[in-house]
Amino acid sequence: MSRQWETWMTLGDEQDPHGHPLIVLSNDEACADANRASLNVLFGSTKRPAIASRPFEIVCDEADGFEKPTVIDCSRIYFIPKGKLARRLGTVSRTRRVQACRKLAEVFRFVFQ
């Protein structure tokens, strides 16, 4: 079972044999609910040293459970089957959670006033 803010690798397939790093966004209740077959996630990819991050991305690292620096795209929230989760990596650090929430609010133009 997964939990909110955990980092995972997806199962590989023909197009992506190594899987994909991600952060679980769904709350713990949705993660634990056997009647819900899918979760909300943010996908990432390995950070390339020569490529600067784009305005809608945050960079996570070993403190967040990733094996290498990983760029997380906060401009798209994906809905994937729970069965696609292959390997738990860790948990997103408190600092990076704040960054992700701020970036999501910025990208989706959420207003809290």
Image (spheres, grey):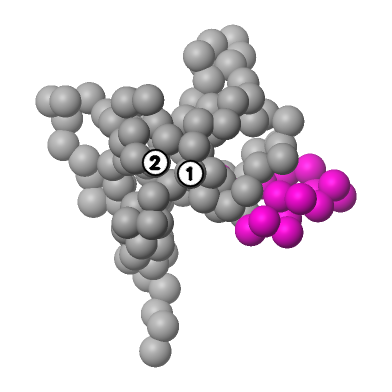
| Residue highlighted by disc 2 | 64
Figure check: 66 above or below 13: below
Q: Quadrant of the C terminus?
A: bottom left
Please check the rendered image and state whether residue 28 is part of the magenta-colored stretch, yes or no. Answer: yes
Amino acid beneath label 1: Thr
Q: Which residues are magenta?
A: 27-41
SS at mark 2? helix
Residue 62 appears left or right of 43: left
Residue 2 is covered by the magenta coloring: no
Q: Residue furthest left?
A: 50
| Label 2 with label 1: CB-CB less than 8 Å | yes
Q: Which mark is residue 47?
A: none
How would you rate the neighbour count of disc 1 (Cα within 10 Å): few for under 14, some for 14-19, many for 20 or more? many
Q: Position of residue 34 (x, y in %)?
A: 85, 47
Residue sitting farthest toward the right: 35
* Mark 2 / mark 1, whichever is N-terminal: 2
